[in-house]
Amino acid sequence: MNMKNKIKIATDLEQSKNLAEILPLESADMCYEVGEDLDGYITKTIYTPLMHTPYNDDYIPCWSLAALMDLLPSKFTEKGKYSETTYSIKIRKYALTEDVDIYQIAYGNYRWHEDESCSWSDMINTGEKENLIDAVFQMICWLKENNKL
């Protein structure tokens, strides 16, 4: 069986901790229960739907891809001194190899050129990621840092 990218269903623990600092906790749709097993190893178990427990070291909210996608705006507008520019979202998926796809999320718009041709121009884009959830996470962090979310 030929498997493409490893499927990631939710933010990982580190991403979840970061998002818990910048997003409303009620936007999370799952959580990690973090604990120790009998041998003293750290365990993490993901639960869905989110257990309504306070955020602490034992229960850390996490976000599914669907929950994160719902947070991304379809577009946003930047107001300059003399004009406004609206940027729309573009989600890209490329085949890097036969077994690996690459994802990228961008906000940009179409620009007209002197020769009357038109092309898409990114205003911002994520790095190329092997999981869509990693690209969405990166974009949400940028949007939040830049007051677009």
Image (tube, grey):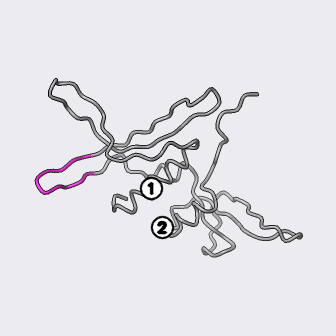
Q: Which residue is mark 1?
A: 140
Q: Is residue 28 above or below residue 5?
A: below
How would you classify the magenta stretch by its main secondary structure? strand
* Labels 2 and 1: the sequence-earlier one: 2
Given the current orientation, which residue lies at the most extreme left position?
A: 82
Label 2's element? loop
Image quadrant where one finds the C terminus:
bottom left
Instruction: Determine whether, in the image, residue 88 is placed left or right of residue 39.
Output: left
Q: Nearer the viewer, residue 123 or 72?
A: 123
Q: Secondary structure at mark 1?
A: helix
Q: Is residue 51 left or right of residue 105?
A: right
Residue 77 x, y percent position in the rendering: 25, 51
Q: Position of residue 135 (x, y in %)?
A: 50, 47
Residue at image x 50%, y 70%? 21
**Mark 2 or 1: the one toward you:** 1
From the image, tell me which residue sits under label 2: 24
Verify CB contact (< 8 Å) between mark 2 and mark 1.
Answer: no
The answer to whether 77 is drawn above or below residue 56 in the figure is above
Query: The disc labelled 2 sits on which kind of residue?
Result: Pro
Q: How many neighbours does mark 2 have within 10 angstroms: few (below 14), some (14-19), or many (20 or more)?
A: few
State the residue lying farthest toward the right. 39
Can you say whether 145 is above or below 76 in the image? Answer: below
* Mark-to-mark CA distance, 2 and 1: 13 Å
